[in-house]
Image (spheres, rainbow, N blue to C red):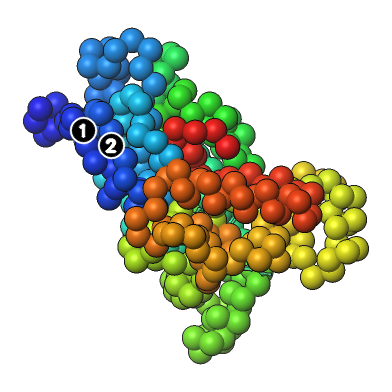
Amino acid sequence: MNAGVDGYRIIENAPLRARNTFGVPAVAPLLVEVTRASVLPELFATAMPTGTCPLVLGGGSNLLFAADPEGIVLSLATRDIRLLDDDGETTIVRADAGVVWHDLVLWTLGHGLSGLENLALIPGTVGAAPIQNIGAYGVEVREHVHAVEAYDRSHRGFVRLTGTDCAFAYRDSLFKHDPDHFIVSAVEFRLPHAYTPRLDYTGLADELRAMGIAGAPRASQVAEAVMRIRGRKLPNPDVLGNAGSFFKNPILPAAAAQALLADHPDLPCYPGDAPDTRKLSAAWLIDRSGWKGRREGDAGIAASHALVLVNHGMASGRQLLDIARRVAADVHARFGIALQPEPRIIGATW
Ligand code: FAD
Ligand code: EPU
């Protein structure tokens, strides 16, 4: 197939080790790489067997291959970013699903636009950003999602979803609950001209001070500070395989959180999405369960951050899943909290 002409190409028995940041071995029987999203309807009508539910693979930074994917794997290699609209107060930027997320952040900063700076250096693609409503350093992407363009498999056509349609919540969205329904083809972002630095997250203001920045920082300086903190805390997947936080921070009713805090006053506790809920630190729970820095064979927990499951080289997805289950079992035994994984697990259930 000629990707330039057809808008897609098919690769048989495609190795996926370099396409997932855990660096675990897996093989896709068929990998369809799409270079033009407009071919999706034709692709589903002709080249895909009826009922096919392809696994959409972005940068593979929030996936664990516990086994080879069974069906077709679809990857969007679409790369356009453009200014869509500007009403004098807000700029709308549209980016294709295949754009690398951090490249979009740099593009917006380069165009004098702010809003995404706290989300600098999150691995992966634009298309995956709404799936778990990526968040970091006090900002979630939902705050800036104007619309999500997606191919709707049940209606066999493109739809445009508003932020409300997407049902965003902490590390959650409509897409996460129904992963076979939508293929995100592009995202439109709303970036207000008025710039308000968001510096509430612990350590961010200190980092700016350490950089010698006094007073209100520019958006690019906030991005720089975020990158410096991330570089210290989180292992670089090019060096040590990982998918960032392996577990979500658990959200509990306020009363249950209060009961735990009575016994563990240093357990970090933040407001939850809903009233009368609290979000607790999964890293702290894992750390206090003695897992930080532990290694069994090539699978383990990072020494720099207790929430990061790591592949020291040759661990399989199964071995990583096994250790993650034992971490969760220990946390449950000690604190009565059932941790939930953040990445999508392929070939096994949690
Ligand atoms: P993938 O891992 O390829 O896919 C993730 C999920 O999205 C899968 O279910 C997949 O099927 C689906 N998907 C992907 N693309 C599409 C599409 N176009 N349409 C429909 N479904 C799609 N996340 C945060 O929120 N905050 C962080 O601070 C953060 N830090 C990280 C740090 C490190 C070092 C790493 C490795 C990961 C981190 N993550 C973080 C997780 C990860 O970067 C994000 O979840 C990211 O959005 C995943 O993008 P991806 O393209 O790699 O998605
Ligand atoms: N902590 C420990 N031990 C550790 C690490 C952290 O006890 O080894 C405690 C500390 O008290 C620290 C607190 O946990 O103050 C919070 O740590 P951190 O600021 O690193 O945040 P996090 O809750 O562990 C979340 C996200 C990250 C995101 C950061 C910054 C989740 C699951 N994780 O981590 O997102 O980058 O905040 O906003 O919400 C990801 O989703 O993959 C991810 C990396």
Is the residue under label 1 in contact with that under label 2 (CB below 8 Å)?
yes
Quadrant the N terminus occupies: top left
Q: Position of residue 56 (x, y in %)?
A: 37, 33
Q: Is residue 216 above or below residue 84?
A: below
Q: Is mark 2 within 8 Å of ligand 1?
A: no
Q: Residue furthest front?
A: 297
Where residue 13 sits, quadrant-wise, is: top left
Q: Name the one closer to the observer, 204 or 213.
A: 204
The residue carrying mark 1 is 13
Three-letter code for the amino acid on which mark 1 is drawn: Asn
Q: Is residue 304 left or right of residue 26?
A: right
Q: Name the one closer to the observer, 172 or 308.
A: 308
Three-letter code for the amino acid on which mark 2 is drawn: Val
Q: Which mark is residue 269?
A: none
Q: Position of residue 6 (x, y in %)?
A: 14, 26
Q: Is mark 1 within 8 Å of ligand 1?
A: no
- Mark 2 / mark 1, whichever is N-terminal: 1
Q: Is residue 266 left or right of residue 185?
A: right
Quadrant the C terminus occupies: top right
The residue carrying mark 2 is 27
Q: Residue at x 77, y 65 (%)?
A: 267
Q: Name the one closer to the observer, 107 or 61.
A: 61
